Amino acid sequence: MNSPDQAMIATDSPSLTAFDSKVAIFAAIVISFVGNAVVLGMPIMVGALADSRGFSEQQVGWLASADLGGMFLASIFTSTVITRFNRRYLAFAGISIAVLANYASTQFHDFDPLFLARVAAGIGGGICYSTGVANIAGTHHTARNFSILMFGLVAINAIELYTFPWLADVWGVNGIFLAFCCSFMACFLVLPLLPCYAEEPPATERNKTSNPSSSSHALPHFLPKLCLLAVSCFYITIGSFWAFIERAGVDAGLNDSFISNTLTVGTVFTLLGCIAATWLSNRAGQSKPLLAALLIMCGALLMLSTGINPLVFALGTFTFNIMWLFTDIYQLGTISNIDHSGRYAALVPGAQGLAQTVAPAVAGFMLSRDLGYGAVMVLGASGSLAAFLIYSVVYAQLKQLAPDVADAS
């Protein structure tokens, strides 16, 4: 008999489910990137709040945190109900909350009610994002499908960066809130395409439902939790780098236009990371590419920590952009292959958001102590190194107990 603190992972070749259909994948991707749209458009929304409503920097910071905090709470909630609640109803609730909260944001001009409206908007968007990610986790070609999602997120980000400034100029921040309303309302059209329930039990409950004679391996419960910890560690890298790389370039005396152009061109390299992730997963699985990517990211930030010049800035930025989504795709794929129910994948947005909230604050504290931008880059490198060590433990366990999961694509 299996120990109660073990999880069962089947080793038979996976059979395709309703989650693997093209329309289900399309629906999951749509609600995912619409649910995450507020994060992608955050810099412009923050500026529009300051310009249109006259809020101080501290107030707009709190409003930005309200959206992110709402998404974090939604991630935790979604993970607790995703395996036993109808996912169409769950997504319907998230869409409805987001539409109402974003419309309410156009009506509230005082800080306190607007803050509450943005928390609600974050909860609605977070439910959609987590539900979409959980549905993609239920597929059996996770690297490919998460690559498509990440490609879509980059495309949506480009659209927002192009259209939101125009909306803000014409209608103020209300134009951005109404754009969110329309985007979420469009998600109602894809709801019928979502599968209703997980077709595989959660990894932590399979030992209760599996036939003792079935071909399966016992995996410790802590493995998917370690994966979530690794995601947070990696997003220490993202949060510390992305918040301060522009300032680090200015501090190093680089030209403003050079910095701006380098960061813009870096988006192209982000798309290359999506393509490379799919290509490599079909040939080498996910474990080796993920470990290599984390070491490369660590090396890039350590290079930036030693001193920044135009060549180092460009090389470090381009490497960061390639490895960012490349690593994200494999992280999502790894936790999904361990647990196709989506319970743990639904927590990924929360793990990301928590680290993205904490890392810039820690980096800012380091700068306030005159430790310099080199120390911030070392902080980022430490996050990737910690994630590498954690995944090394995860893959060692998978290699021993379930090699097919470790090498899955």
Image (cartoon, rainbow, N blue to C red):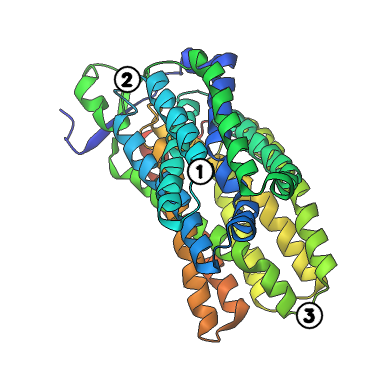
Query: What is the secondary structure assignment of the residue under circle 3?
Result: loop
> What's the CA distance linking mark 2 and mark 3?
61 Å
Name the spot of residue 25 as percent of width and height, x first. Answer: 56, 21
- Amino acid bearing label 1: Gln
Pointer 2 local density, CA inside 10 Å: few below 14, some 14–19, many at least 20: few
Q: Residues within 10 Å of mark 3 (few under 14, many from 20)?
A: few
Q: Please state if 47 lies on the left or on the right of 74 as rendered.
A: right
Badge 1: few (under 14), some or many (20 or more) residues near its Cα, within 10 Å?
few
Residue indicated by mark 1: 107
Where residue 359 appears, as percent x and y from the top left, is 48, 64
Residue at (27, 33) in percent of width and height: 204
- Label 3 near label 1: C-beta < 8 Å? no
Verify CB contact (< 8 Å) between mark 1 and mark 2.
Answer: no
Direction from residue 181 to residue 256 in the image, left or right: right
Dot 2 lies on which element?
Answer: loop
Does 227 sit above or below residue 409?
A: below
Image: 231 above or below 212: below
Quadrant (top left/top right/bottom left/bottom right) for the N terminus: top left
Q: Residue at x 23, y 27 (%)?
A: 207
Amino acid at pointer 2: Ser
Measure the alpha-carbon separation of dots 1 and 3: 44 Å
Locate the C terminus and report the quarter of the image it occupies.
Answer: top right
Where is mark 2, residue-wise? 215
Residue 231 appears in the picture as rendered: no
Q: Residue at x 56, y 65 (%)?
A: 240
Quadrant of the rendered structure where residue 313 is?
Answer: bottom right
Which residue in the protein does label 3 denote?
253
